[in-house]
Amino acid sequence: MSEPAVPAVHPPRAARVLSIIVIVVGALMVAVGITTYAYTTSQLADQQIDVSAVTPEDPGSMAGDPVDDPFSALAEINAIQHHTDEATGGKTYAELGNVATSDGKTYNKDVTADTSTDGQAHKAGDTLSDADAKTYSARSTAQTSSFLQASLFLSVLAFGVSALIIGLGLIVALIGVTIHLTLRRPRAQAVV
């Protein structure tokens, strides 16, 4: 006696359509991630920045390379921080006193001997002492350094988010493919 034919059970059409949508969404995520990564690379390269040497004796492995990827951007951030620390004595922008007017030539307020870099009291409008002028210059350097580092960190963040989107897109697409292939195989209906 032969076995009766077992009819195949086909998955609902909505499940197959959903699997295709998941594949397409994953592919779009990969495309968007790659486009963002390439755009960030292009924009960073357009700035024509080369990685600065940290010191003449130890310039760093990427010194002289163009800044156009996350690794060269991080190397430049490191070089900027090193040079800023040298110029400011390791002090941050907030740690350097603000006693000068915006032109950097005169005091913006009365300064006591305790708060002045040179240990002398000064009146608002007096010409900056050499020590306070040096502090003003260091403060300006620290400010510019902060802006440059923040801009480069933003590009590093953009690279990271792009890579994350590419990775998640691949995972989503693979899940969609797996579901789609699983749904394509007809399953035998259980015989009762």
Image (cartoon, rainbow, N blue to C red):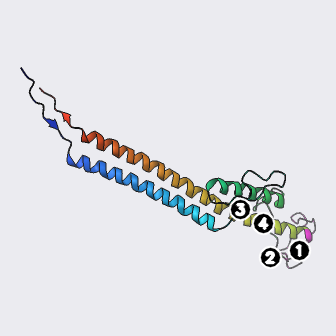
Closer to the chain start, of discs 1 and 4, is 1
Name the one closer to the observer, 164 or 110.
Answer: 164
The residue indicated by pointer 2 is 101
Q: Is residue 121 above or below residue 152?
A: below
Give the residue drawn at x 10%, y 24%. 3
173 relative position to 109: left or right: left
Q: Is mark 2 on a helix, strand or loop?
A: loop
Nearer to the camera, 87 or 73: 73
Label 1 SS: loop
Q: How far apart are labels 1 and 4 at the CA level?
A: 17 Å
Which of pointers 4 and 2 indicates the residue nearer the eye? 4
Residue beneath the point at 66% across and 57% down: 73
Q: Is residue 76 left or right of residue 36?
A: right
Mark 2 belongs to which amino acid?
Answer: Thr
Task: Pick out the residue farthest to the bottom.
Answer: 125
Q: How far apart are marks 3 and 4 (CA)?
A: 19 Å
Which residue carries the number 3 mark?
Answer: 50
Dividing the picture into quarters, in which one does residue 116 lie? Answer: bottom right
Give the spatial CA distance, label 2 vs label 3. Answer: 33 Å
Left/right placement of residue 156 relative to residue 92 reads left
- The C terminus appears in which quarter of the rendering? top left
Q: What distance separates the C-alpha of mark 4 from that of mark 2? A: 16 Å
In the rendered structure, which disc, 1 or 2, sits on the residue that comes first in sequence?
2
| Marks 2,3: beta carbons within 8 A | no
Q: Is residue 125 magenta?
A: yes
Residue 144 coordinates in the image, percent (x, y): 73, 67
Q: Name the residue beneath numbered marker 4.
A: 141
